[in-house]
């Protein structure tokens, strides 16, 4: 039961750090430690029922997934990976029907909320689009839509996933 | 055990160096591979060498302008209002014969050299050639030294001096890095041999193929056939870089 194990491991980590939102008691602990700074709880997207990985894995490892995936894409032309940054933005920061989007400098941006809290600068969006595909781009740029959505087939698993024992990704 | 892993490894290495074991799986010990062939993941076509054949006889000045603006639209590198610098993935060249005044126009972009000097000089490995021959800058590792710009004899690269906004998802680009024509790599990864780069799309009307994309390694491909029948010029072939972009009518 690799999943159960990783969940347990994560739960332990949360207890030790007492930092991440969502775990019982975490919020209170963090408050007492850091005064009255509110712990970010970025809005979940409405457009998909679940993320590419469980939330607790994504919180901890999203940067590793992206780092691994970017080389696969740039060097090996592997598009449509389930860890595509465009895929993230399509769900987490979709462009409104009027074309209006939340920019990453805005504290409301999905990534910015936690990054501001943790004082970690986001470099990604100095080059990459900080929002989902605009309506006019959909279809034309669909090679960047995450393939895992369209098909039931399990996408190639990364070394990192294997290490984490989260190959079933649920 | 009867197998001597060291010996196997050595002979494989020799084969590898000789270049004969082009796609051999190297077995170190039963079940353990030093190097395994066959791409597990999808992605680029390793056996291909992508190229473009540009028929300058079929291109008017307006056509070449159309190439440039199509590329700008596709990758979002239009120079912003008030900007003092100029991105250039592709530019218009005018050739004029002084005696007769006859003019020709051609689009000039990264030639996707087989032996690219831009790759040779890059101190970080950011400038690289993909397995399918497309030469790119990996902006994650580019430090903006611009050696590659100086090394490129075709002046195909440009540098981003300013903060950018609203980059397109298919073409991430940002301040402090070098950029050049990617042969519309996002289209190539999607469509393979059927890909049509944006510049070609802009000028290929009806069935004309003023700019033809294809696999130079495949003798059956249209580009190979046309090169065989009608020939094609490598710009400054004397430099021996063997560009993947060829021209006709020069
Ligand atoms: S044309 Fe210039 S940038 Fe393109 S591969 Fe050749 S040397 Fe490099
Ligand atoms: S500018 Fe970037 S790609 Fe060019 S040589 Fe320097 S590090 Fe390499």
Image: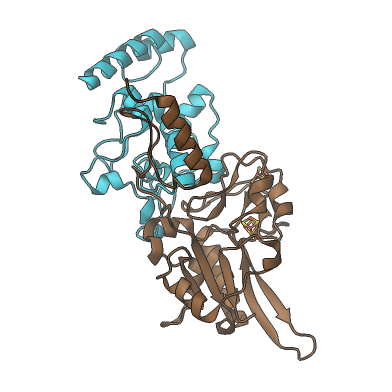
User: Looking at the image, is B96 positioned above or below residue B140?
Assistant: below
Which image quarter: residue B155?
Answer: bottom right
Image coordinates of residue A170 in percent, x first then y, are 24, 30
> Could you tell me which residue is drawn at 61 percent across and 64 percent down?
B109
Image coordinates of residue A16 in percent, x first then y, are 38, 8
Which image quarter: residue B4?
Answer: top left
User: Looking at the image, is B140 positioned above or below residue B167?
Assistant: above
> Could you tell me which residue is drawn at 64 percent across and 60 percent down?
B241
Image coordinates of residue A48 in percent, x first then y, are 27, 41
Answer yes or no: is residue A64 visible. no
Which quadrant holds the N terminus of chain B? top left
Image coordinates of residue B212 in percent, x first then y, are 48, 73
* Closer to us: A102 or B41: B41
* Colour of chain A in the rendered structure image: cyan
Q: Seen in the image, is A92 located left or right of residue B243?
A: left
> Could you tell me which residue is drawn at 48 percent across and 50 percent down?
B131
User: Looking at the image, is B87 positioned above or below residue A86?
Assistant: below
Name the residue furthest right: B99
Answer yes or no: is residue A103 visible. yes
């Amino acid at each position: 039961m690799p999943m159960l194990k990783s969940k347990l491991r994560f739960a332990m980590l949360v207890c030790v750090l007492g930092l991440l939102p969502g775990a019982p008691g975490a919020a209170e602990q963090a408050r007492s430690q850091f005064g009255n700074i509110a712990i970010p709880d970025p809005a979940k997207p409405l457009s998909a029922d679940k993320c590419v990985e469980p939330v607790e894995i994504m919180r901890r490892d999203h940067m590793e997934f992206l780092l691994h995936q970017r080389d696969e894409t740039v060097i090996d032309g592997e598009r449509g990976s389930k860890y595509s940054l465009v895929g993230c933005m399509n769900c987490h920061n979709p462009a409104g029907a009027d074309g209006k989007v939340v920019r990453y400098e805005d504290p409301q941006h999905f990534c910015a909320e936690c990054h501001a809290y943790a004082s970690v600068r986001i470099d990604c969006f100095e080059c990459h689009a900080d929002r989902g595909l605009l309506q006019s781009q959909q279809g034309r740029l669909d090679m960047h839509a995450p393939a895992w959505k369209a098909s039931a087939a399990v996408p190639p698993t990364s070394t990192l996933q294997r290490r984490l024992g989260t190959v079933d990704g649920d | 055990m009867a197998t001597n892993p060291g010996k196997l490894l050595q002979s494989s290495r020799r084969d590898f160096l000789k270049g004969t074991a082009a796609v051999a799986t190297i077995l170190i010990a039963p079940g353990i591979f030093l190097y395994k062939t066959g791409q597990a993941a999808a992605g680029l076509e390793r056996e291909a060498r992508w190229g473009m054949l540009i028929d300058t006889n079929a291109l008017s000045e307006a056509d070449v302008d159309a190439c440039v603006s199509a590329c700008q639209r596709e990758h979002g590198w239009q120079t912003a209002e008030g900007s003092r610098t100029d991105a250039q993935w592709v530019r218009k060249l005018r050739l004029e014969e002084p005696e007769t005044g006859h003019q020709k126009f051609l689009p000039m972009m990264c030639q996707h050299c087989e032996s690219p000097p831009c790759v040779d000089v890059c101190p970080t490995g950011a400038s690289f050639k993909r397995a399918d021959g497309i030469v790119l800058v990996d902006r994650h590792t580019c430090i903006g030294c611009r050696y590659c710009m100086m090394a490129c004899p075709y002046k195909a690269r440009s540098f981003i001096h300013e903060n950018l906004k609203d980059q397109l998802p298919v073409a991430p680009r940002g301040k402090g890095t070098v950029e050049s024509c990617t042969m519309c790599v996002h289209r190539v990864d999607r469509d393979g041999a059927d890909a049509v780069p944006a510049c070609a799309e802009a000028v290929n009307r009806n069935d004309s193929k003023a700019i033809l994309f294809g696999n130079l390694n495949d003798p059956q491909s249209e580009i190979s056939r046309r090169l065989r029948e009608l020939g094609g010029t490598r710009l400054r072939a004397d430099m021996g870089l063997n560009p993947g972009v060829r021209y006709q009518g020069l």
